[in-house]
Amino acid sequence: MGTHSEEKNMITEPLLINKNPKGGLRTLPFIIANEAFERMASMGLMPNMILYLCGEYNMETTAGTNVLLIWTAATNFLPIIGAFLADSCVGRYPMIGFGCITCLLGVVLLWLTTILSQAQPPACDQLRSDCESATWSQLMLLYSALGLMSLGGGGIRSSSLAFGAEQLEKGDENKSKGALQSYFSWYYVSVLASSMVAVTCIVYIQDNLGWKVGFGVPAVISLLSALSFFLASPFYVQSKANTSLLTGLIQVLVASYKNRHIKLSSQTTEEMYHPRKGSMLLVPSENLRCLNKACIIKHPGQDSTPDRRASNPWSLCTVDQVEELKALIKVIPLWSTGIMIAVTISQSSFPVLQASTMDRHITPNFEIPSGSFGIFTIITVILWIGFYDRILQPIASKIRGKPCQLRLKQRMGIGLLFSTASMAAWAITETVRRNIAINEGISDDPRAVVKMSAMWVLPYHVLSGLAMAFNMIGQIEFYYSELPRSMSSIASALHGLGMSVASLVASFIMNAVDEITKRGGKEGWIPSNINKGRYDYYYWLLAGLNMASFIYFLACCKAYGPCREEASEALDEKDGKEEEC
């Protein structure tokens, strides 16, 4: 018979020295590789897709751009739906697995459109106006491929980051926290690296080896993405689906509507409301008081159970749920100010068309693919983040003798101004390019290359990168700092939702401009022949809309009031003055 301590060791030791535990660091490379390969495949197809649609499917520039904008909108929106389903219904592992298979099918189907001659309309010279359009069945095959890719990407991107974090939740808390920070860093590095490979190597293959090989490479990469995920299946921690935060927000709206006839008293008491178990928040705030009806206890003995849970969560919500919805509603106006900058960034097809008509040679034997110029935007973002975090901010803090950094709303506003400047630079470049094409007598040929270096487009890409670094990253940080910690998933979803809405807005603006400027039998601003149109006028319009968005942003900032960081700074300054007195 062993002692009590020996029996205790026999019980606890297997938990500590399990030779085949679930989860842990060994699963993370598979999860990171899965996401990185998926991004590489999808982003490698995007830059040159406008050339593929116009050249192989005989689409007009506006029609092809509409396809890409709707595809982008779906790709950015479906991860939100995927996250909701993964959290509330199916779980993260099945959602990622579904995404892997669906994305692979989509990429393979797109690759088949380059192999099967029946999948495309007859080849036609773009100079001709009587080219045969794609048939309904050909377009359905193309759209099905793009749709499956968006659906698959939504499944993977919605759950990949959180699924990796799940693998590290058990064990020593300090070690798990350090491993989690490392995981997040490597996750975003891998996404960034895969994006850079996609817009350089894959685009270069498409330009030099053709569509069959150029689309075949992403198909192989998608296969690697699926394999890298499923290979580690026996070792994953697979948590069951739970109630989604989005469900909780919807419950507040439903409960508020059901209780709309309740009259709110002028004096609030703690007994009237239903707090979350263990929460310090007992009474809701006074703003948006109509939502407070969702957490009012009408019948104390019936509305809640003995363990203080709501008998019907669709009729009675917690105070925390109500305040979470209020916080979300409060940031919506400032969220909407980022739509216009996302509209300008979503104009990804036009820079490719513009660069394809310019001299892209770096050396006599090498030229940059027109779809690869987006790499300069990515490089700008990386360089600015490194410069700001490691050089500018420390120097400014040292000079002032206290921590010094730009506030979140300041960064968002500066980003909008950079976005305006990027569109102005783009418009000026296009005016110069178009005049050269006319003077050289090649305006009738949309494929003709003008004697103008494609490096002229760099100011646009650099300014766009700065706009993203200031505004879009500032937006994400703003959501995370202003919303409660329990809403971190909503904070990340807001960015994707904004990009999705922006793609639809960009499609609407482009179609409206095309329709209005073509009236009276005119060529219009954005025809298929870039030399015949007035793309520069279109870019100036976008610059004006960005400036209007900046003015709207200033009004929203004033209405929002001080952020949490501003309120905290003001309180610190007040405490410092009191100490001096």
Image (cartoon, grey):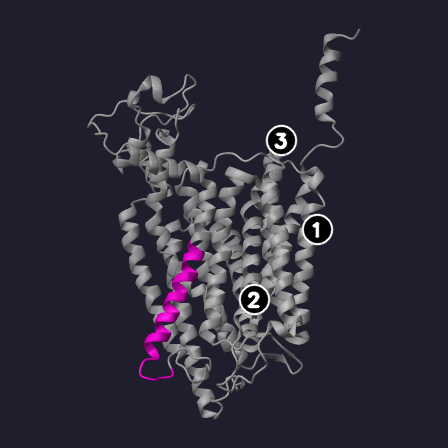
**Side of 46 where 472 appears, left or right:** left
Read off the magenta span: 498-523
Q: At 44% across and 57% down in the image, what residue appears?
A: 499
Q: Which of pointers 2 and 3 indicates the residue nearer the eye?
A: 2
Q: Quadrant of the C terminus?
A: top left
- Which amino acid, by three-letter code, is at mark 1? Leu
The label shown at residue 91 is none
The residue at which mark 3 appears reads as 170
Can residue 459 be seen by looking at this rendering?
no
- Which amino acid, by three-letter code, is at mark 3? Lys
Asked which secondary structure carries label 1, the reply is helix
Q: Using the image, determine if residue 11 lies above or below residue 192.
A: above
| Structural distance between the alpha carbons of marks 2 and 1 | 25 Å
- Which amino acid, by three-letter code, is at mark 2? Leu
Asked which secondary structure carries label 2, the reply is helix
Asked which secondary structure carries label 3, the reply is loop
Q: Quadrant of the N terminus?
A: top right
Q: Using the image, determine if residue 147 lies above or below residue 243.
A: below
